[in-house]
Structure formats: C-alpha cells, structure tokens
Image: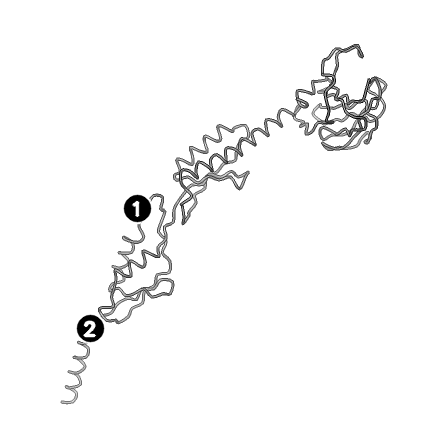
Amino acid sequence: MKLLRIIAIALTIIIAIIFIKFKPAYAVSLNGEELGYVGDEEKFKEEINENVLKSEETNVAFVELENVDYSISLVSRNQINEEIVLAKLEDSAKNVYRVYEVADLNNEEDKVYVNSMEEAESLVTSLKEQYSAIEPNLVINTIYLENVDEVNEENIKIAKEKMQENLQTKLEEKEEKDSRTVNGIYLACVPVTGRITSRFGANESIRDHTHKGIDIGAAGGTPILATADGTVTYAGWNSGGYGNLVIIDHGNGVTTYYGHCSRIYTSKGATVKAGDKIAAVGSTGNSTGNHLHFEIRLNGKQVNPQTYVYK
C-alpha cells in the first residue's frame, strides 16, 4: 500500500509538471505545411475572419485562403505563437477583385474592364446609341481577378478607344455596303476597272437619246466581272446597238447589262457569283472604241450606276 501511495504521488507530480510546462494546442497547417500552434481553434478562426479575410481595398470581392487545417497536439507552452501564425496566413492570403467586363460578342478581342456596374452600363448605353446603325452586341459580365494592375484609367481609356475604333470600322463598312446596295442587292465589285468615258444622262452625237448607262474605257480583252450574284438571262448578240450583251438578274427587280463585249464567257441560265468573269471588253455593236457599256435597271428602269459604283 505504501508503494502504491508513492507511485500515485509520483504520477501526480509528473502530471502536474506536464500541465505546467505543456498544454493542449492546435497545429495550424496551410496546404500541408505546418505554420505553428494556437491555443483556441474557434477564437483563432474569428481572428482570421477579422484580420485576414476582410479587406478595405477597393473592388475586393473576397479574400482567398485555401486549405487551412487544424490538428490538436500537446506542446510546450512557449510553442504557441498565434501572432506569427496569423502573419503567415496574411502573407498567403490573396485578394480576389470584382470588375465588370463590357464585351462585344461579335468580336472576342473587344473587351473593356471597368470598376463598377454603373460605369459598365453607362459605356454600353453610350456605345449602343452612338453605333445604333450596326446594333452592337454588347454584354456586361462580372469578372473576378487576382491582379487588377491593368484596370487603371489609362488602360480603360485605351480599351474603350480600341472598341470604338472597331465599331466605327464596322459602321463605315455598313455605310459603304448600304451605299452599294440597290433594293437589297449588294453590288460587291465593279465590273471592270477603267476610266469613265460617258456618264449616265449624257447627250452625245452618237445616239438620239440620253445615255442610259455609263461607259468605262478599258483595253480590249479586259475581263468583265459580274457585279453581284445572280442568274444570266441573256448572253449573246443584240441588234439594238449593244453588240455582244450579257444580262444578269440579281433578284428584287434588279438587273445589270454588260454591252459591247468582244467575247462572252457565260451562257443563259448560268448562276454567277460577284466577281465571276462573264465577258471581255470590246467594241461590238454601236461603239466607237473599246469600252464596257454598263447599266443597272430597277424594275426595268435604268438608274444611274454611279449612285452605287464608280463614285
């Protein structure tokens, strides 16, 4: 019994020494790397929430801190170092910023990052009003970034200018296309490159009426191109002064005439595309030299080709 009392006293002394020198604590690890020890897990998590996971910096959506683990241990009291562990977690935390992307769905490269939804909405409204003729397909996306160094006034200005330049180019292309469109038919190319020698409506001694087309002077044999997609309705000799003549029906009441050809490379009923070679410049029929007589007719009535091409 005496021996048992001695053993019990000894154990009590040992336990007392252990609890004086050591205490239960929590080992804190980040991505598997142990950072140190803290005394109270719940209180330490509150410290993290207040001091690490909150930011006063502009546009910070949240602070990212991944894979923090806790495991209970019995450690020497002087091993508990909450301030050091907290500082290490602060160093490892990443700010995730919320910005707003104005993007053109018709051009993947066109995008502008701005700092607020109000600024994004204002930009979209402004661009849609300015370029309403081309109906820009602009959307606003919320984007989360770890680095917002590029979202500054200078880069925002550059990105806006680039987007405006691209929209302006599209607008000019549409205006150019519209100016070359007859009743919905786009005249994609000129039939031949050369100098205009007689304009629409001209009064000249070689005819007893005003000119109903334009004459484009070019060397004999120069290729003549279909100015728009269509179907050939006439390809052959015309005794009414046109000489070798090609007529193309483009739909919507629009037809084009190509007269005085030296050779014809297509035939009635053929389907042609804009830019296809259909004939060659010549001086057949009522002609005083090599040229193309070109007409545009809308519902059978001649209109001035220079309204649409050869401006």
Three-letter code for the amino acid on which mark 1 is drawn:
Glu
Position in image of residue 285 (x %, y %) = 84, 19
Taking the image as shown, residue 133 lies to the left or right of residue 125, namely: right
Quadrant of the rendered image containing residue 234: top right
Q: How many marks?
A: 2
Taking the image as shown, residue 223 lies to the left or right of residue 5, namely: right
Residue 232, compared with residue 300, is above or below; it is below
Report the residue at 82% width, 27% height from top. 235
Name the image quarter holding the C terminus.
top right
Instruction: Find disc 1 in the rendering and name its residue.
Output: 56
Taking the image as shown, residue 311 lies to the left or right of residue 203, namely: left
Circle 1 Cα neighbour tier, 10 Å, few/some/many (<14 / 14–19 / ≥20): few
Which callout, 2 or 1, points at the residue further toward the start of the chain?
Answer: 2
Task: Please state which of residues 295 and 45 is positioned toward the viewer in this rendering.
Answer: 295
Element at label 2: helix
Three-letter code for the amino acid on which mark 2 is drawn:
Lys
Element at label 1: loop
Residue 126, compared with residue 78, is above or below; it is above
Residue 121, compared with residue 44, is above or below; it is above
Circle 2 Cα neighbour tier, 10 Å, few/some/many (<14 / 14–19 / ≥20): few
Position in image of residue 306 (x %, y %) = 68, 20
Instruction: Find disc 2 in the rendering and name its residue.
Output: 21
Q: Which mark is residue 272?
A: none
Residue 77, compared with residue 15, is above or below; it is above
> Whole-Å distance between the Cαs marked 2 and 1?
41 Å
Quadrant of the rendered image containing residue 183: top right
Report the residue at 41% width, 48% height from top. 147
